[in-house]
Image (tube, helix red, strand yellow):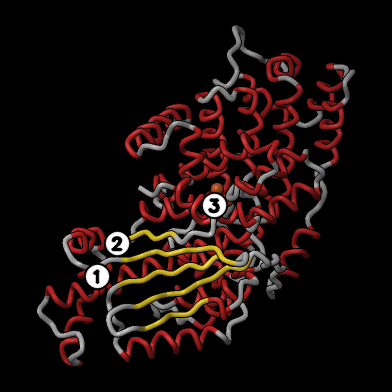
Amino acid sequence: MLDIDDLVTKLIKGQPISVRFKYTNDKVLQEFHVLFIHILAYFDQLFLLEVSFTILKEILYNASKANAKRLFFIREALDISNPEDYQKGMAIFADEVTMKWTEQQAYLDKSDFYIQFDAKIKDNILYIQAENNAPVLPEEQERIQKRIEAAKKYNDLSDAFMDMSDSTESAGLGLILTQILLKNSGIGRDKFRIEFQPDKTIAHFQISGQVVPIITNSKFNEQILNEIEGLPPLPQSVSKIIMLCNKPDTDINILTNEIEKDAVLSADLLKLSNSSLFITRNKANTVLSAVKVVGLKNIKNMLYVSGVRKIMGNRYEKVQKIWDHCAKCSFFAKVIAMDNSRHKLADLAATGGLLHDIGKLIILSLDKKIVEKMNNFQIQEKDSSVLIEEFTVGISHADIGGRLLKKWSFPEDLIHIVEFHHRPFLAPPEHKDLLEIVYLANMMLDALENRANFFTINQEILKNFKLDNEAVFNKYLEKIDLQFKASHQ
Ligand SMILES: [Fe+2]
Ligand SMILES: [Fe+2]
């Protein structure tokens, strides 16, 4: 366990910190993630969190893999510097080591191999170093240099994906990713280098407190902006009813009249009023009684969602999977809010959940090949953030979603839910509580779908919901999932 407070205090005082461990896994990285949040917050450079953490993740995993590779050759009694033995070892390396990573941890635990993380802050620059005690063979050095060189020709990740043949496995893409992140984030390529020593390898990486966010300009930007621009406004009937709901002295009969004009909306409202979300003694069977049960606030929330679905549903195909995910996220968000005495936020969190991924519909309308490769890479990197999207198409689905809601003049809290659902720590403080709920709900779904796990969720947010214990977390996840299944039979 890292003593985060102690490490951060030392760093701020200008003292060097050093942490040694045996191997890299999600658990180790979860702690480094918290450490990085605190360091970058101190630096006022939180916008670099995902970039710098992704680079660190690549460095630490590579160091760990290099150690495991040496250890594997020793175990197999193969001489790594003998070309024949090297070939023999590498023929089974992927199957025996990469695919069986958990097993490697036990081997590494018992070995003398280590990884050492060092950091210090000097003159407003954060210096990071990751050392591992496996030397790199000359031909490996050459391969690494070649990849760094090759990465120079790419403007963004989409270029790298374009270059990748379908059959090529994306090994080595990590190093290319690092290079593109360094360049396009404004940190600079020269701030990263690998030092090869006879008995160890050291990766150096530095972040200056002066880095300013740069606006990425990808070839897809215009296409995306045009797509957003081209979407129609909310249907007039919907915005009219929203307006009526917003009026303090609205006549409930006039409102009911308006809703009755729209058959789909009336049906949705009746369904909602009779759902398990509202406990009523009598079944609501008229629109008027449904309005009374559900209340103006919830009618409004329902309208936001149905307005968006009307527009997007007509325009984009293959969206059911996203709507299903959003519906489930909404359910999870509501339950999490209720279970954690945040009742007041429950309806809003549930509505935000229903809308949170609408930006994905626009991403899906882009070049299919790029989108597919991007998705595969996200799965491989176990990265459920939006970083890879930003460095591939120039903008994330969260940002796109936020822009859409702004275009439709949605209330600010809903815009912020969509915009920050992957980055709750960047949300305006007044919406932090709300964002944590939706972030957690979404991450729990990702965990159910194997795109995330307990260790890839922000530890401090887990703590806020008393879920910072793996067993407790998994039990809770299972519980809500069962609840969801029971209510959707
Ligand atoms: Fe998302
Ligand atoms: Fe999502």
Q: Nearer the viewer, residue 66 or 87?
A: 66
Residue matched to label 2: 23
Q: Secondary structure at mark 2?
A: loop
Residue matched to label 3: 37
| Residue contact between numbered discs 1 and 2, judged by CB atoms under 8 Å | yes
Distance from disc 1 to disc 2, alpha carbons, whole Å, reads 9 Å
* Residue reaching furthest to the top: 281
Instruction: Give me the disc on residue 30.
Output: none
Residue sitting at x 51%, y 50%: 9
| Residue 185 percent coordinates (x, y) | 63, 69
| Residue 187 percent coordinates (x, y) | 61, 72
| Residue 312 percent coordinates (x, y) | 69, 50
| Residue contact between numbered discs 2 and 3, judged by CB atoms under 8 Å | no
Tell me the kind of residue under disc 3: Ile
Distance from disc 2 to disc 3, alpha carbons, whole Å, reads 22 Å
Q: Nearer the viewer, residue 392 or 111?
A: 111
Residue depth check, mark 1 versus mark 3: number of the one nearer the observer: 3
Q: Nearer the viewer, residue 370 or 179?
A: 179
Tell me the kind of residue under disc 2: Tyr
User: Is residue 181 placed above or below 194 in the rendered structure?
Assistant: above
Q: Nearer the N terminus, badge 1 or badge 3? A: 3
Q: Secondary structure at mark 3?
A: helix
> Residue 320, can we see it?
no
> Residue 93, can we see it?
yes
Report which quarter residue 266 is drawn in: top right
> Callout 3: 10 Å neighbours few (<14), some, many (20+)?
many
Q: Nearer the N terminus, badge 1 or badge 2? A: 2
- Using residue 129 as the reference point, say whether residue 319 is left or right of it: right
